[in-house]
Amino acid sequence: MTSGERSRGRKNLVAARVRWNEQADELIEELRSLARPRLIVISGPSGVGKDTVIEQMRLRHPEYSFAVTATTRPRRPGEIDGVHYIFMARAEFEEARARGEFLESAEVYGHLYGVPKDRVRRALRAGQYVVVKVDVQGAASIRKIMPDSIFIFLTPPSMAELMRRLRGRKTDDPEALMQRISTAAHELRRVYEFDYVVFNENDRVEETLDKIDAIILAENSRLPREGRDV
Ligand code: ADP
């Protein structure tokens, strides 16, 4: 082999290494783009602590966007229109629903609830995680439209504790309370429709938040199945 041939051989090798490195960098970029913002669906029976958990998430993650649910139910003391809920008259709600403006909507205990689509989509496009609170039926509807979301079911430590929390909230008369408990028992049976179950243990809301953070972190590190070379 002449010295000219040796030099060409070395150059080819260097060129090949540069190509491999470039390809590897492309792969690294592709991997980075997998961790895109998603919709986080927080569900579970009434009284389990969804609002409490989401209130704390607001403090811990001001960078997240929190979808505001529209409702026809009367405003409770302390609730702010546009912050906790968007309060609507029934006719107004029904018109918006007919125009297909809700991601999901449902009638619960005689009141209509719905998550407006536009705010959710806008926030996701802007690169924000979006957190949405819905009942179990609502979660099932969202799964049909946005199956890529992360579905989390909050569970009470026991039915007795759920009853205690509902009583403590003092928003229901005894009949409504019994209705909620019986609905909760049915809803629990749909837990397997979700991706994750999180126990909201007694007086350990911070721990519940840690678990949700861990889920999001793990989801961000997960590789799609179709990318596997098997
Ligand atoms: P949801 O939004 O699921 O209906 P709330 O957030 O209104 O439930 O909570 C119902 C009641 O339970 C509230 O009085 C709340 O303070 C209480 N609660 C929530 N999480 C916990 C917890 N981890 N331990 C004890 N009580 C809780």
Image (cartoon, helix red, strand yellow):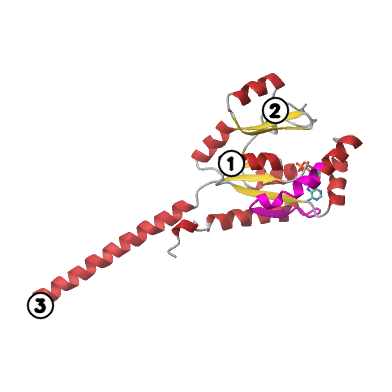
Q: Residues within 10 Å of mark 3 (few under 14, many from 20)?
A: few
Residue 3's tag is 3
Q: Is residue 33 above or below residue 112?
A: below
In the rendered structure, which amino acid carries the disc numbered 2? Asp
Whether residue 65 is visible, yes or no, is: no
In the rendered structure, which amino acid carries the disc numbered 1? Lys
Q: Quick one: 162 or 178, which is closer to the camera?
A: 178
Asked if marks 2 and 1 touch (Cβ < 8 Å), the reply is no
The part of the image, by quadrant, that contains residue 173 is top right
Question: In the rendered view, does 83 fall on the left or right side of 175?
Answer: left
**Where in the figure is residue 167, as x and y percent of width and height?**
88, 42
Q: Quadrant of ligand 1?
A: top right
Whether residue 36 is visible, yes or no, is: yes
Q: Which residue ends up furthest to the right in the rendered image?
A: 174
Q: Residues within 10 Å of mark 2 (few under 14, many from 20)?
A: few
Write the start and end of the magenta stretch as one range. Answer: 183-204
The part of the image, by quadrant, that contains residue 81 is top right
The mark nearer the N terminus, 3 or 1, is 3
Residue that badge 1 annotates? 144
- Spatial CA distance of label 3 from label 2 is 81 Å
Q: Is residue 143 above or below residue 97?
A: below
Residue at (32% x, 60% y) in the render: 23
